[in-house]
Image (cartoon, rainbow, N blue to C red):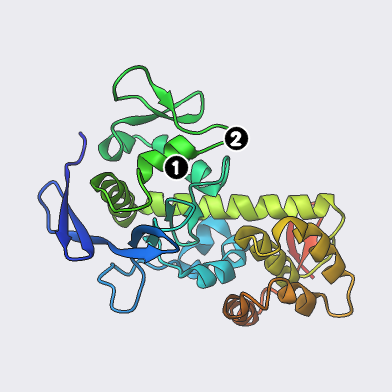
């Protein structure tokens, strides 16, 4: 049975109630580089704290949940993190999956949610058709919202305009927030997608003959560079050069480090805080990290 969400506004702040229950915070309207959207993580935010902690999921995922933790620290760690104000149109989750990338982490994550039996409670007008996110309840025939080349229709579904906050945007955000806050399996979907993405990064790096017997701390920086995108179009070239240097870890951290100094500092501190990183190396035969 679809959940009835009702938008409530208090100045710049937007809330929702679900089936008449007490309202919960969705986000605050904010301008950004000519756009207007929502964000919900800031000083004094009334957002519920629902933070990722690797230790809570070690039984399900082993070392891989530790491997994604430094990036989670850089991204705020809250499973309910939202922003709709930048070019991605809609970003959500503890590592901020972004809707603008065709076949990217947000797309895989949202597909996994729509495959759940309770998906109709939250997004009754969406379904998977041939593995694609499709609007099935609307005027006319079903409309596929994402392809290998574009997610523009999905971005417009989640955030119809970039010059104001609309009810559709608030409602989409509220559905993700409520679903995530109330279902551990939905939080696990975020973790599974993040691990899958980082496994893919490592598989690609291994295929390029870059990481055999490299420590997990070096590999984690590589994965964060690729997730964050700070290496740009020459990321792999920069990574290869860094790995050939006298101090590969420092050289990797230096990629994009001038612009993103605070992020790199957070990443390095999180890696240093976990002794398992220096004690594990990448094993190409097993496609996994093993103890030295």
Horizontal relation, residue 228 to residue 27: left or right? right
The CA distance from mark 1 to mark 2 is: 17 Å
Q: Nearer the viewer, residue 205 or 277?
A: 205
User: Which element carries disc 2, helix, strand or loop?
Assistant: loop
Tag 1: Cα neighbours inside 10 Å, few (<14), some, or many (≥20)?
A: some
Horizontal side of residue 119 vs 52, given as left or right = left
**Could you tell me which residue is drawn at 62 percent across and 59 percent down?**
227
Q: Residue 259 carries which label?
A: none
Q: What element carries label 1?
A: helix
Query: Is the residue marked by circle 2 packed among few (<14), some (14-19), or many (20+) residues within 10 Å?
Result: few
* N-term-proximal mark, 1 vs 2: 1
Furthest residue in direction left, as rendered = 20
Give the image location of residue 202, x and y in percent.
73, 55
> Residue at label 1?
110
Counting from the top left corner in percent of width and height, residue 287 is at: 76, 52
**Residue that appears at 35% across and 46% down:** 161
Percent coordinates x, y for residue 48 in the rendering: 28, 67
Q: Answer with the quarter of the image where residue 280 lies.
A: bottom right
Q: Is the C terminus in the top left, top right, bottom left or bottom right quadrant?
A: bottom right
**Residue 211 visible in the shown view:** no
Q: Nearer the viewer, residue 218 or 15?
A: 15
- Please determine whether, in this image, residue 104 is positioned above or below residue 201: above
- Residue most extreme to the top: 141
Residue at image point 12% right, 58% down: 22
Quadrant housing the N terminus: top left
On the image, numbered disc 2 is attached to which residue? 149
Does the rendering let one see residue 74? yes
């Amino acid at each position: 049975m679809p959940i009835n969400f009702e938008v409530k506004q208090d100045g710049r702040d937007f809330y929702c109630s679900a089936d008449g229950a007490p309202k919960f915070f969705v986000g605050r309207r904010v301008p950004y580089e000519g756009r207007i959207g929502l964000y919900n993580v800031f000083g004094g935010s009334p957002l519920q704290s629902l933070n990722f902690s690797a230790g809570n999921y070690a039984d399900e995922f082993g070392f891989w949940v530790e491997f994604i933790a430094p990036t989670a620290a850089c991204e705020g760690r809250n499973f309910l993190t939202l922003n709709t104000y930048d070019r991605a149109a809609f970003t959500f989750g503890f590592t901020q999956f972004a809707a603008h990338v065709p076949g990217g982490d947000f797309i895989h994550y949202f597909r996994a949610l729509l495959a759940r039996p309770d998906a109709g409670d939250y997004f009754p007008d969406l379904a998977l058709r041939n593995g694609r996110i499709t609007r099935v309840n609307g005027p006319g025939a079903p409309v596929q919202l994402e392809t290998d080349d574009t997610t523009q229709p999905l971005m417009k579904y989640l955030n119809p305009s970039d010059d104001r906050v609309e009810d559709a945007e608030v409602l989409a955000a509220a559905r993700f927030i409520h679903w995530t806050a109330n279902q551990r399996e939905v939080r696990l979907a975020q973790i599974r997608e993040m691990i899958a993405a980082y496994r893919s990064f490592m598989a690609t790096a291994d295929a390029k003959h870059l990481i055999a017997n490299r420590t997990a701390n070096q590999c984690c920086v590589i994965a964060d560079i690729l997730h964050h995108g700070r290496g740009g179009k020459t990321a792999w070239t920069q990574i290869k050069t860094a790995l050939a240097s006298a101090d590969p870890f420092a050289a990797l951290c230096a990629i994009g480090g001038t612009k993103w100094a605070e992020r790199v500092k957070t990443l390095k501190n999180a890696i240093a805080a976990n002794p398992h990183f220096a004690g594990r190396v990448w094993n190409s035969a097993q496609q996994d990290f093993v103890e030295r």
